[in-house]
Amino acid sequence: MRNPKTNNLLLLVAVVLVLLGGWCLWGPSGGGLISLNEGNFAQFTGQFDSAASDERVLVLVSPT
């Protein structure tokens, strides 16, 4: 059986991870998540390049 302090710590870590995930998806950037394809790649590069003085985050997720 786990120590109650360990259970509380695991619960706290899980809550923090959920909150961070929510902030990344719906935070200050407004959740500007898009799926890149050939049709919108030129628009994406234009927006990315025009924000040279701002904070930019790009996350690539691959199923392989």
Image (cartoon, rainbow, N blue to C red):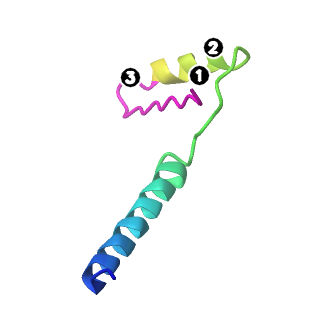
Binning the other alpha carbons within 10 Å of mark 2 as few (below 14), some (14 to 19) or many (20 upward) gives: few
Please give left or right for residue 5 compared with residue 57 in the image: left
Q: Residue at x 42, y 57 (%)?
A: 20
Judge by depth and name the residue closer to the eye, 14 or 44: 14
* Local secondary structure at mark 2: helix
Compute the Cα span from label 3 to label 1: 13 Å
Q: Residue at x 64, y 24 (%)?
A: 36
Residue 52: assigned label: 3
* Local secondary structure at mark 3: loop
Count of numbered tags: 3
Q: Residue furthest right?
A: 39
Q: The residue under label 3 is which amino acid type?
A: Ala
Camera-near label (3 vs 2) is 2
Residue 61 image offset from top left, x and y in percent = 53, 31
The quadrant of the image that shows the N terminus is bottom left
Is tag 3's residue or tag 2's residue first in the polypeptide sequence? 2
Q: The residue under label 2 is which amino acid type?
A: Ala
Q: Residue at x 27, y 83 (%)?
A: 3
Q: Residue at x 70, y 14 (%)?
A: 38
Compute the Cα span from label 3 to label 2: 16 Å
Residue 55: assigned label: none
Is the Cβ of the residue at disc 2 closer than 8 Å to that at disc 1? yes
Is the Cβ of the residue at disc 3 closer than 8 Å to that at disc 1? no
Residue 42: assigned label: 2
Residue 44: assigned label: 1
Residue 4 image offset from top left, x and y in percent = 30, 85
Residue 19 image offset from top left, x and y in percent = 44, 63
Binning the other alpha carbons within 10 Å of mark 3 as few (below 14), some (14 to 19) or many (20 upward) gives: few
Camera-near label (3 vs 1) is 1
- What segment is highlighted magenta in the picture? 51-64
Q: The residue under label 1 is which amino acid type?
A: Phe
- Asked if residue 62 lies in the magenta stretch, the reply is yes
